[in-house]
Amino acid sequence: MIDLRRSKKNKKGKKIWLVIAAIIGVIVIGIAIFALYFYNFTKNTVNERMNVPVDTIDTNLSKKKLKGTKPINVLLLGIDAHENQNGRSDAIMIMQLQPKDDAMRIVSIPRDARTEIVGKGFDDKINHAYAFGGPNMSVDTVENFLDIDLDYYVTINMDGLVELVDELGTVSVMNDVAWSDSKYDFPIGAVEMDGDKTMAFVRMRKKDNEGDFGRTKRHRKVIEAILSEGASAGSIPKFKGLVDVLGGNMETNMDFDDMKKLFGGYTNTRKNISEYMINGTGKNIDGIYYLIVPDEEIKKAHDLLTIEE
């Protein structure tokens, strides 16, 4: 039986790092598609190792949207699990790509948000949907929660996070707040980081006077740093290793042709990123903590993600 209660040792900040890796992963695949030397390797990795269709998404409709370069919604799930574990989606975000405006909107759903788990018939934490029914149930539950349509999903697990950055070598970010933990120092200015240090950088919250807002800025810096390093000419020899890491740690209902179309018409959406975090009020029900999201907050998120083509 799966224990779905929160661990006493909650790993704060893990969820955003998972989603950063998911976003970077999709973009790395897109870059590799255009590196002719790795074309066949990338195609085989995506179609044979990463592509896992779901019944809950009409892929024919999604493909039509990509062909016409229409706005799309992509569900990003960061899975807190290792090999042979069911895990939960402890990071849940919807990445909306708007090619007409060259914009990307990221809406975060708190993992403790209480809602109906579609297919189970009862209310629970939204991140439990993945443990109960994988990406199919997660897609159904998120669509029902916000009354929206999703076009694609992407999952990535913890095992691939540090490997992804380490495969690049290091990334460099401009740090605005000087701080240290038990292992690393982060002075003001340019900081060179490997995978483990990058995880520490994005997880920190309590030593930043700006709290979650400051942490969000660091997340953006890491995304930009990895994109910059991954897109550089010097990283081309590393693409095979990057794609191989993703092949073992990432799943999506996109196939290779979908990704080609995605990066043919949606690449510039990363130039203008906006973010929104769904809010609510904490409440204990039968001894378990939940986040109760009011109707007006759900409507706000729905309106942000309802795309006018």
Image: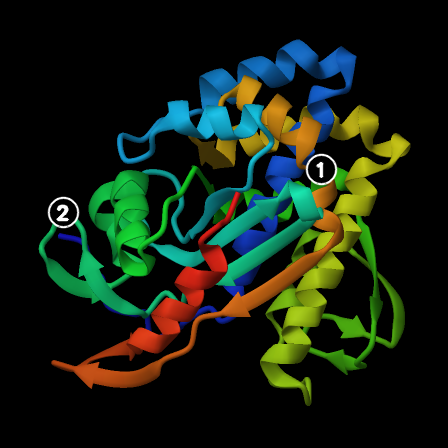
Label 2 close to label 1 by CB (< 8 Å): no
Which residue occupies 49% across, 17% down? 47
Q: Amino acid at mark 2?
A: Gly
Please determine whether, in this image, residue 3 is positioned above or below residue 265.
below
Question: Residue 100: x, y in percent?
Answer: 67, 43
Question: Residue 42: x, y in percent?
Answer: 62, 18
State left or right for residue 98 relative to residue 32: left
Please determine whether, in this image, residue 25 is positioned above or below residue 219.
above
Q: Amino acid at mark 1?
A: Thr
Q: Which residue is mark 2?
A: 119
- Which quadrant would residue 212 be assigned to in this image? bottom right
- Which quadrant would residue 57 be assigned to in this image? top left
Q: At numbered mark 1, what does the secondary structure look like: helix, strand or loop?
A: helix
Name the residue furthest left: 121
Label 2 to label 1: alpha-carbon separation: 35 Å
| Pointer 2 local density, CA inside 10 Å: few below 14, some 14–19, many at least 20 | few
State left or right for residue 269 relative to residue 235: left
State left or right for residue 136 relative to residue 214: left
Residue 241 visible to the viewer: yes
Q: Which mark is residue 267?
A: 1
How was this image coloured? rainbow
Question: Residue 79: x, y in percent?
Answer: 41, 50
Which residue occupies 33% across, 84% down? 281
Q: Which mark is residue 131?
A: none
- Which quadrant would residue 56 be assigned to in this image? top left
- Foreground: disc 2 or disc 1: 1
Which residue occupies 26% across, 46% down? 140
Front-most of residues 266 and 184? 266
Mark 2 or 1 closer to N-term?
2
Residue 86 visible to the viewer: no
